[in-house]
Image (cartoon, rainbow, N blue to C red):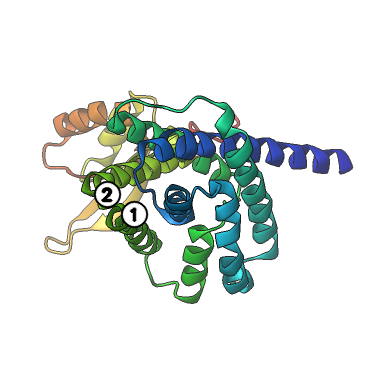
Amino acid sequence: MEFRGWRKWLFDLLVDVAGGLLIAIGVYNFAAMAEFPMAGVSGISLIIYRLFGLPIGFMTILLNVPIVFVCVRFLGKAFFLRSLKTLLISSVIMDYVAPLFPVYQGERMLAAVCTGVFAGLGYGMIFMNQSSTGGMDFVTLSIKSRKPHVSLGRIVLAADICVVLLGGIIFRDVDGVIYGSIVTSILTAMIDKLAYGFHAGKLALIVTEHGREVAETIGEFGRGATFLKAEGSYSGKKKDVVMCACNNKQMFGIKKKVKSVDPEAFTIIMESNEVVGQGFRGSHL
């Protein structure tokens, strides 16, 4: 038990260091040098860095102090302590390690892409390890705990837009606002891809009167299916709903095959962020 505890602690430390390094490179070596605004507390720290030259990591910790006092009672103790450790590590890396690397002096668009990719990978690693870098994460999670009906995405989007616009207004840089929006979009996409995309797939719901034949067709692609019994609300006819989870490549072929088996089939295809179980990730086969 003690060995597993040390192993988990060491793993968490490595994730914090790796994630913090990626975030620091994205923010310091690309965003700061390209002089465009970013979202969140890092974005506010960047504004202060450009105005007064104060270290980004130090300002990130300083700005988190009032946020912590306000939000700590809404967050679980374990999550708060993990996030505090991650915040300190990432801030130290930002101020003392990132400056050791060369800064990018090229096109602002390429800098925006690199900022989004590097920082997105870093944040994604940290979030997947059940931690955060504090800042707006604390604010959004606290708001969500008080008002669970409010969309978390809307809270994050509103906060991000405000910080990016603030940077554009202060420095009178319309292009910077556009680049900042690009960074935010890429960063969010990278986090989602890291958290879900590698195990994403499709979910098909096929309403048909030939459920067995459709299932056999799906079996040709190495996928199983589940029957859900249904009844047409207008016709009153008994029908099968064939539910099938598959990867993105298989869905195109399955859709064509189903159409050939039952041209009248009603097929609904949905995005599935993560598929876990037999034949997918997490399977013991």
Q: Choose between 20 and 201: the one closer to the eye.
A: 20
Q: CA distance from mark 1 to mark 2?
A: 7 Å
Res 254 quadrant in image? top left
Q: Three-letter amino acid code at disc 2?
A: Val
Residue extending farthest to the right is 2
Left or right: 34 in relation to 46: left
Q: Are marks 1 and 2 in contact (CB under 8 Å)?
A: yes
Q: For mark 2, give the secondary structure.
A: helix
Q: Residues within 10 Å of mark 1 (few under 14, many from 20)?
A: many
| Residue farthest along the bottom direction in this orientation | 146
Tell me the crowding category of disc 2: few under 14, some 14 to 19, or many 20 or more residues within 10 angstroms, Cα based.
Answer: many
- Residue located at (52% from left, 69% from top): 142
Q: Position of residue 228 (x, y in %)?
A: 34, 51
Q: On screen, 184 above or below 79?
A: above
Image coordinates of residue 285 in percent, x first then y, are 58, 27
The quarter of the image holding the N terminus is: top right
Rendered location of residue 4, percent (x, y): 81, 40
Which label's residue is closer to the chain start, 1 or 2?
1
Where residue 265 appears, as percent x and y from the top left, is 16, 42
Q: Say which residue label 1 marks.
A: 167
Q: Secondary structure at mark 1?
A: helix
Q: Where 175 sits versus 75, above or below?
A: above
Which residue occupies the foreground of this view, 95 or 11? 95
Residue 277 makes an appearance in the image = no
The numbered disc on residue 177 is 2
Location of residue 175 by image quarter? top left
Residue farthest to the front? 52
Q: Residue at x 22, y 40 (%)?
A: 210
Work out whether residue 246 can be spotted: yes
Is residue 207 rendered to the left or right of residue 138? Answer: left
- Three-letter amino acid code at the position of disc 1: Gly
